[in-house]
Amino acid sequence: MENDPSAIPHRERAREAFFGRLKGPTLRPGQAALLETLLPTLLIDLDTPAPANLTALFPRPVAAVHLEIGFGGGEHLLAETQRRPDTGFIGVEPFVNGMAKLLSTIQVEPRANLRLYDDDAVRLLDWMPDASLAGIDLLYPDPWPKKKHFKRRFVNARNLDRFARVLVPGASFCFASDIDTYVDWTLQHCRDHPAFEWTASRAADWHQPFAGWPGTRYEAKAIREGRRPAYLTFRRV
C-alpha cells in the first residue's frame, strides 16, 4: 500500500529515539575502510524478515541472544562476547566513531557471536520477534539532563513496552548511569511498568558493577569527577 510505513526502507524512516550526533572527528583511512568492508558483513538487515529465532543470525550455534544498546567504544560488549562465547550478542551504536573503534578491534580479534546495528535501536526492537532476547543492556546512555529534553531519554514507557515484548520471562534489563536524575527516572519508570521488577535488596546491590564488568572510559571519567555510578538490574516478570 502507498501509505504503508512498512513498505519504506527502514533507513528512510524518521528516527524515534536517537537524537545525538552521528559522527565525531574525522576517521583514519583504515577506520573508514572498515566501515565499508567489515561492517556490512556484520550488519543486521531490517529490510528482510526477522528469523523466528534470533540465534539464526549467527554463523555458529549460540544458546541465547543478548542486546546492548549504545555500546560506545565497545569495551563492555567486546568483554561480554569473550566471556560468554555461547551467547550471541547484538550491539547497537549509531555513532560512527564508536562503531569504527569496535571494528578496529574485531578486525584483529574476530567474534563469531557478534552482530551489529548502526541506527536507531527502536527500529531493531520493533523488527525482533516476541520473547527473543535473554537480556538487554543500556549502559551510560545520554542522560539529556535538561528538563525540556527528558522526553528524549531512552527509558520511557513506550520503550519499556518494547523491552517487555522482546525479553523472555526472567530475562534482565541492566541499566548503568552516573547521573542521579536519570537513575531516579529509570527506577520510577520501571517501578511503574508491570513487566519489570527491581532485583536489588540492599544498597550494595546497585553500587556493585555487573558480573564480569570490565569498566569503561566514560565510567572512569565519571568517578574521577566525583560521580558515583549506579548499576540497576530489572527482571522481566
Image (cartoon, rainbow, N blue to C red):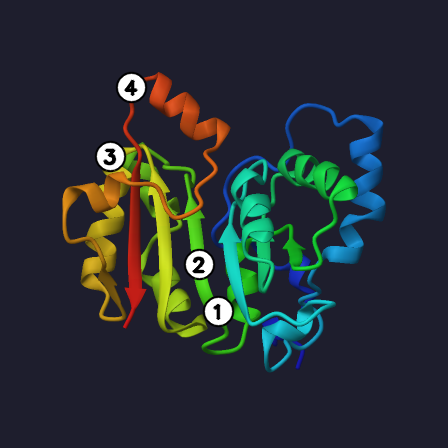
* Crowding at mark 4 (Cα within 10 Å: few <14, some 14-19, many 20+): few
Which amino acid lies under the numbered mark 4 shown in the image of this protein? Gly
Q: Residue at x 54, y 50 (%)?
A: 80
Which amino acid lies under the numbered mark 3 shown in the image of this protein? Asp
Callout 2 secondary element? strand
Among the two numbered marks 3 and 4 on one chain, the one whose residue lies closer to the N terminus: 3
Among the two numbered marks 3 and 2 on one chain, the one whose residue lies closer to the N terminus: 2
The circle on residue 226 is 4
Which amino acid lies under the numbered mark 2 shown in the image of this protein? Ile
The residue labelled by disc 2 is: 136
Identify which residue, 81 or 68, lies in the foreground: 81
CB-based contact (under 8 Å), mark 3 and mark 1: no
User: Could one spot residue 75 in this view of the protein?
Assistant: yes
> Which is closer to the viewer, label 3 or label 1?
1
* Crowding at mark 3 (Cα within 10 Å: few <14, some 14-19, many 20+): some
The circle on residue 133 is 1
The residue labelled by disc 3 is: 180
